[in-house]
Amino acid sequence: MLLVETITAIGIGTTYESAHVGGAAWLTAGSAVSLVGIGLLGVGVVRIIVALRSHSWSRAMLSVPLLVVAGGAVVLTVGDLLGLGLNIAFINSSSPGATWQLVGAIFDALFFGGLAGTLAWVGSLARRPDPTGTDVGDAIGA
């Protein structure tokens, strides 16, 4: 669905550019950047699946694929931020509903930014070795 939305946005952006709508280049640029992010998401998910299907997978094997997925989410965030240019141009031209489009686009960018931060944190935690010893999480020995 995200891929279809991005390809459609590129089409809409080029149509708007042909009609000389202000800010249309921002939509096209943001969508092109988002295509790269979708590619990174796909690569990361495939690497996670490959790691989980191996006979001797470990948490550490999931670290790099999770960081690749986080990188894809960061690129999607940048693409959404670039796409805000069209929404800002619509507000400047007093287009009806433009404020709600801008608010929705901001929340979209915040969602992907939060997702990227969460995945990067989980990916970095996966690199750490498992805690050993009786002092960690041992309620009986306390």
Image: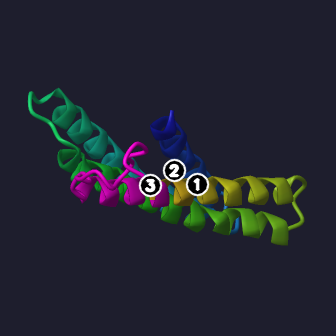
Q: Residue at x 47, y 55 (%)?
A: 118
Can residue 24 be seen here? The reply is: yes
Name the element at disc 3: helix
Q: Picture quarter containing residue 53?
A: top left
Label 1 belongs to which residue? Answer: 13
Q: Mark 2 or mark 3, which is nearer the start of the sequence?
A: 2
Q: Amino acid at mark 3?
A: Ala
120 above or below 139? below
Name the element at disc 1: helix
Q: CA distance from mark 3 to mark 2?
A: 19 Å
* Mark nearer the viewer, 3 or 1: 3
Q: Are marks 1 and 2 in contact (CB under 8 Å)?
A: yes
Q: Residues within 10 Å of mark 1 (few under 14, many from 20)?
A: many
Q: Amino acid at mark 2?
A: Ile
* Residue 127, numbered label: none
Q: Picture quarter containing residue 92?
A: bottom right
Please tell me whether residue 133 belongs to the stretch shown in magenta.
Answer: yes
Q: Residue at x 26, y 44 (%)?
A: 43
* Residue 10, numbered label: 2
Name the element at disc 2: helix
Q: Nearer the viewer, residue 113 or 78?
A: 113
Q: Amino acid at mark 1?
A: Gly
Q: Residue at x 25, y 39 (%)?
A: 48
Region rendered in magenta = 117-142
Residue 51 screen position, x and y as percent:
17, 37
Q: Is residue 127 left or right of 31 when viewed as pictured?
A: left
Label 3 belongs to which residue? Answer: 73
Q: Are marks 3 and 1 in contact (CB under 8 Å)?
A: no
**Residue lying at the far bottom of the rendered structure:** 92
Q: Is residue 89 left or right of 40 when viewed as pictured?
A: right
